Amino acid sequence: MLSATPEPAPAGSIVFGAEALEVRTDGSTVLYPYGKGAADAIASVSSLLGAPQSSVHVPVSKCQPDETTVTWSTMTLEYESVDPAAAAWFRVQTRTVSVQVGISSPNGARVGDAWASYAGSLAGHPNSTGDYQGKTYTGIVDSASLKAPTYGTIVDGVDGTITGITAQSDLHADC
């Protein structure tokens, strides 16, 4: 008789915190503040998700810096620079269900989960809902930075399903 082989447990987890990217492995958590260079965060995420692809976006004017996007199968990391160690900040985003590792917000949002069960526990958090071309779009401030309260973690949804997590986001941006 054949039995189903259980899925292996994720090797670790990643949390898109309001002030830092948290990488959890082997019972320990390492914080990578968004206001520091990105090199160590890239190396740590790569140890869980494998080698990334990187692309540099050349500015269209002298007033814009080079921006690099590092992409794994389930998340991206962007920073202003061509050198991750010299980056003054970085930002992370996921829009894909991760089976390799758990990727979540500080309050437990995961891409693909039901919006109602997640957002229902965040009563009082700033949020928005709008309809466009037959779809209902939602967004909520999952967590805000204590050091810089205009920045934090944003969770987005479409038609009742969580579709994205972004940190560190400008909580006053309109896009």
Image (cartoon, rainbow, N blue to C red):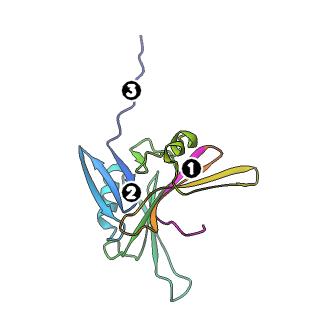
Say which residue label 1 marks: 163
* Span shown in magenta: 161-175
Residue at 46% from the left image edge and 79% from the top image edge: 66
Residue at 69% from the left image edge and 50% from the top image edge: 136
Choose the circle earlier in sequence order: 2 or 3. 3
> Measured from the top left, where is residue 96 in percent x and y?
52, 49
Q: Amino acid at mark 2?
A: Gly
> Measured from the top left, where is residue 1 in percent x and y?
41, 10
Mark 1 touches mark 2? (CB < 8 Å): no
Residue 17 is tagged as: 2
Q: Amino acid at mark 3?
A: Pro
In depth, the one of 61 and 140 nearer the eye is: 140
34 displayed left or right of 163: left
Q: Secondary structure at mark 1?
A: strand
Choose the circle earlier in sequence order: 3 or 1. 3
The residues tagged by marks 3 and 1 sit, at their Cα atoms, a distance apart of 26 Å
Mark 3 touches mark 1? (CB < 8 Å): no
Residue 86 is tagged as: none
Badge 3: residue crowd in 10 Å (few <14, some 14–19, many ≥20): few
The residues tagged by marks 2 and 3 sit, at their Cα atoms, a distance apart of 30 Å
Mark 2 touches mark 3? (CB < 8 Å): no
Say which residue label 3 marks: 6
| Residue 168 is one of the magenta-drawn residues | yes
> Measured from the top left, where is residue 43 in percent x and y?
30, 60
Q: Is residue 4 depicted above or below 12 in this figure?
A: above
**Nearer the viewer's eye, disc 3 or disc 1?**
1
Q: Main secondary structure of the magenta part?
A: strand
